[in-house]
Amino acid sequence: MPIWHAQAVTTYRQIFAIGEFRALFVATSTSVAGKTMEMLAVSSIVYAYTGSPLLAAIAYLGGFLPQAVGALTLLSLADRLPPRAAMVTWRVVHAGVVALLAVGVLPVWGMLALLLTVGLGDAVVGAIGATIVVDVVPEGSYVLGRSVLNVSGGAMQILGYAVGGALLALVSPAGALWTAALIGLATAAIVQFGLKWRPPRAVGRASVGATWQGNKALFGDPAIRRMLLAQWLPNGLIVGAEAMFVPYAGEAAGALFAGAAAGMLVGDVVIGRWTSPSLRSRLALPLYALLAVPYLAFVVRPGPVLATALVVVASFGYAGTLAIQERFVATVPDRLLGQGMGLAGSGMMSAQAVCAAIVGATAELSAPGIAMTAAGVASLAVSVALLARPWPAMPVPRASREATEATEAAPLG
């Protein structure tokens, strides 16, 4: 069961005073940087061998493609493995895979097949990593901890691109891969020595059937189903609009991408640090609307400066996801929390890929600005449909619920 701290924390100083959170922060940050370098290097190698932009794109996103498959087949493992052991073991295995890629003995098809296979494991361990945040931070502090990790992840992704690009230019793709492998081993050590041992959340044998049963239970709850869709669709449609930055702005696309990252980071800081749970709940729909509405202006093709400003404002709205995630963590049964977090994350990435394809196809038939506006309209409509209705009352906090259950179970007299 979760190990809860006695009192929620509200400041960055307080949350970084928790030793386990510091270890999780460093491990997560370095892992993001290493993964970014790995994707960049593998894509470069595949393109150098084949000259195919399609295969290069598959190599770049290959580890993400199996996420949906993993969500449908393997996620029951997320609640049935000891978290620390699973995270450490998989990081060592993944580092070995990256080292094998660096050696250069595999043909291109072998590299792609290996990446797709590894992606299945990444789906499970990603779910475990997302869930461990709930155990590490005090109850009531999940949003603060999640927002800190979001900000760090965005910053380290930028750093990973910068360092990976420098290694590609100055050394070789193999050098970038060896660096990523060493980073993977370092993160395994940080997790091993920085996190406590915890038992699995659920008992029983993991299987495809258990995964299907867990997914059925999650989707069978109307509130949880709404929360899953709210994490997948509105954001996925806006990511689809962002996929049009290059066709829309050409050489100025970099400013739009930077603006999107900046707006998202500021939103995570402001909403994660300076709002209460009740205020976040009330702000969820306005923030999701803010995410979509600025994209309606792209139908008139604003210039690069105004377009960047619109993207900055819109991307602040990504912070609405924090409110949904906070309610999601409080609502999902503890025995399914790992699977629920994995389903939310895998579904989010899958939805982004599908929406990017749909928006791209729309742009082929019209124009990038029109497709971006259509994505904004669709995102706004979905947000209203999912979030305008009142939510059920927030569940009893986990710590209080467990204390009550323990009291009721205690013998009388």
Image (cartoon, helix red, strand yellow):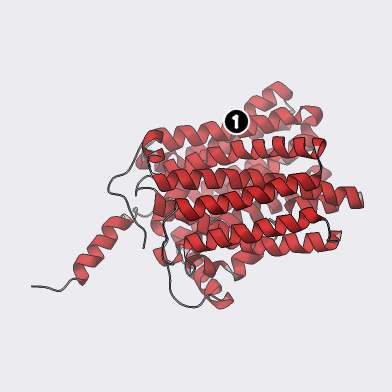
Amino acid residing under circle 1? Ala
Q: Is residue 60 left or right of residue 266?
A: right
Q: Is residue 142 visible?
A: no
Question: Circle 1 sits in a helix, a strand or a loop, which is it?
Answer: helix
- Residue drawn 73% across and 52% down? 61
| Residue 83 higher or lower than 204, as above or below | above
- Residue drawn 70% across and 54% down? 354
Q: Residue furthest top?
A: 305
Q: Position of residue 133 (x, y in %)?
A: 45, 51
Q: Position of residue 4 (x, y in %)?
A: 33, 53
| Residue 302 higher or lower than 230, as above or below | above
- Residue drawn 59% across and 61% down? 90
- Residue drawn 74% across and 44% down? 176
Q: Nearer the viewer, residue 389 or 216?
A: 216
Q: Position of residue 259 (x, y in %)?
A: 64, 29
Q: Is residue 132 left or right of residue 163?
A: left
Q: Which residue is mark 1?
A: 262
| Residue 261 higher or lower than 219, as above or below | above
Q: Is residue 182 visible?
A: yes
Q: Nearer the viewer, residue 238 or 97?
A: 97
